Amino acid sequence: MQAKRILNEPIIANESFPDLGGNINGPSIIEVPEWISNPLAKYYLYFAHHNGEYIRLAYSDFIEGPWKIYESGTLQIENSLFFGHIASPDVHIDNENK
């Protein structure tokens, strides 16, 4: 396996979304599985703000973007076992169990 930087820059950067507070933590990108009903786009990019209130989601039909923010977040801190700190999502797809 080889990793290749797309467009010679990060997929997402602080400058991409200045309203988010300037801290993009632990981005994890997936191609949305075919079994997902009504996906927002072809790719989902999960990330967090260090000490944020939720895991954030950006979505795009192209891996190089442009990315749009899903405004309400995905995992709210009050619905987790984390206290005051939620960051660095690592997303795994379980195709067998959907």
Image: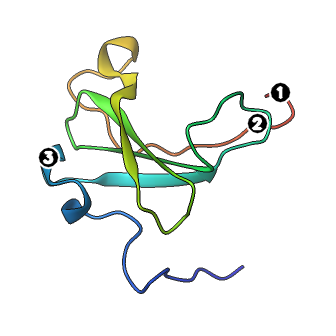
Residue 10 quadrant: bottom left
Instruction: Determine crowd level at label 3: few under 14, some 14-19, many 20+ residues with C-alpha closer than 10 A.
Output: few
Instruction: Determine crowd level at label 2: few under 14, some 14-19, many 20+ residues with C-alpha closer than 10 A.
Output: few
Mark positioned earlier in the residue sequence (2 or 3): 3
Do callouts 3 and 1 mark residues in contact (Cβ within 8 Å)?
Answer: no
Mark positioned earlier in the residue sequence (3 or 1): 3
Image quadrant in which the N terminus is located:
bottom right
Residue, disc 3: 19
- Determine the CA span between mark 2 and mark 3: 33 Å
Residue, disc 2: 94
| Position of residue 59 measured from the top left corner of the image (x, y, whole percent) | 48, 47
Give the farthest residue toward the right.
96
In the image, is 84 to the left or to the right of 43?
A: left
Do callouts 2 and 1 mark residues in contact (Cβ within 8 Å)?
Answer: yes
Considering depth in this image, is 92 or 81 the residue closer to the camera?
A: 92
Residue, disc 1: 97
Regarding mark 2 in the picture, which secondary structure is present there? loop
| Position of residue 52 measured from the top left corner of the image (x, y, whole percent) | 22, 34
- Determine the CA span between mark 3 and mark 1: 37 Å
Three-letter residue code for mark 1: Asn
Regarding mark 1 in the picture, which secondary structure is present there? loop
| Position of residue 54 measured from the top left corner of the image (x, y, whole percent) | 31, 29
Do callouts 2 and 3 mark residues in contact (Cβ within 8 Å)?
Answer: no
**Point 31% across, 20% down: residue:** 77
- Determine the CA span between mark 2 and mark 1: 6 Å
Q: Which of labels 3 and 1 is toward the front?
A: 3
Three-letter residue code for mark 2: Asp
Residue 84 quadrant: top left
